[in-house]
Amino acid sequence: MIWAILVSFAICSVTMVVHMVGLVVLMAVMRARTGRIRPHQSMVRQTGFIMLIVFGLFAIHAVEIWSYALLYLALGEFSTLEAALYFATSTFTTLGYGDVLLSQDWRLVGAIEGFNGFLLIGWSTAFLVTVIGRLRAIEFDWLDHHLEGD
């Protein structure tokens, strides 16, 4: 059991670093593109901006899920990448079908993966809500500024 806890701690640390670096990269992309977003001019640009962020979050989570899948392969828990990826995805998203299982030696890693995924998805949700809130704030500031000018 101690090995499962140590392995879980290590992979959780890796996924948290991946998540943090991924969000920093997304923030840099946002800063670079913020000057091009004019809330009054183009809903298409706003939509594209939000989609860019959503796909970026999806990519971050994909890296994290693949990390778990590769770990399960390295531990010898699955014989195919597809099975490892399927298990990692369903566990990370806390869906957990239960049709593919880990051995007793490593099942604690799977349980901790579910908790880790839950936290990281929540972190991404908070990030996305903040981004959309800031877009709305920019839009309202622009609207207030132009209404005062009339």
Image: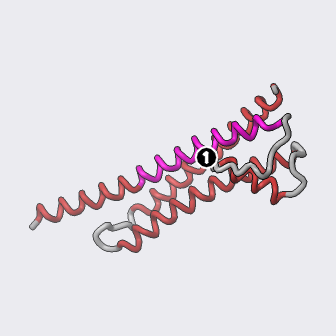
Horizontal relation, residue 121 to residue 77: left or right = left
**Can you tell which quarter of the image residue 114 is in?**
top right
Q: Which residue is mark 1?
A: 19
At 45% from the left and 63% from the top, the residue drawn is 50
User: Residue 48, image x and y in percent?
Assistant: 46, 69
Q: Assign the N terminus to one quadrant of the image.
A: top right
Vertical comparison of 67 with 41: above or below: above
Viewer can see residue 20: no
Instruction: Give SS at disc 1.
Output: helix
Magenta stretch encompasses residue 16: no
At 81% from the left and 56% from the top, the residue drawn is 83
User: Residue 137, image x and y in percent?
Assistant: 30, 55
Q: Which residues are magenta?
A: 106-131
User: Residue 89, image x and y in percent?
Assistant: 70, 53
Instruction: Check disc 1 and give the amino acid type.
Output: His
Viewer can see residue 85: yes
The secondary structure making up most of the magenta span is helix
Q: Assign the C terminus to one quadrant of the image.
A: bottom left
At 40% from the left and 67% from the top, the residue drawn is 46
